[in-house]
Amino acid sequence: MVGPGWHPLLLRLHERLLSLEPGYQIEDLKEKLGGVRIHVTAASAIALAEMRGVLTEAEKQSETIC
């Protein structure tokens, strides 16, 4: 569970991830060092590589949200 401050960020992230890989799955989502950390799986290695960049961006953004 995450705090309400991250909800808009996570909803935007979900939309972006769906556009890259409609069947993606979240394996782990947790708070770590004041930011969110998310690990996903995807059927396509190419999509997963693109998703990593999107995830890194969202994780950095989460560190600025209280």
Image: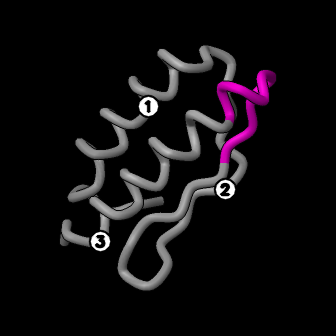
- Disc 1 to disc 2, how far (Cα)? 14 Å
Secondary structure under badge 3?
loop
> Number of marks in the image?
3
**Percent x, y of residue 2:** 40, 61
Which residue shows up at 21% across the image and 58% down it? 5
The residue labelled by disc 1 is: 14
Q: Which residues are magenta?
A: 40-48
Q: Nearer the viewer, residue 9 or 47?
A: 47
Residue 65 lies in what quarter of the image? bottom left
Residue 10 lies in what quarter of the image? top left
Which residue shows up at 39% across the image and 37% down it? 13
Residue type at numbered disc 1: His
The residue labelled by disc 2 is: 28
Mark 3 crowd level (few <14, some 14–19, many ≥20, 10 Å Cα): some
Quarter of the figure with the C terminus: bottom left
- Disc 3 to disc 1, how far (Cα)? 18 Å
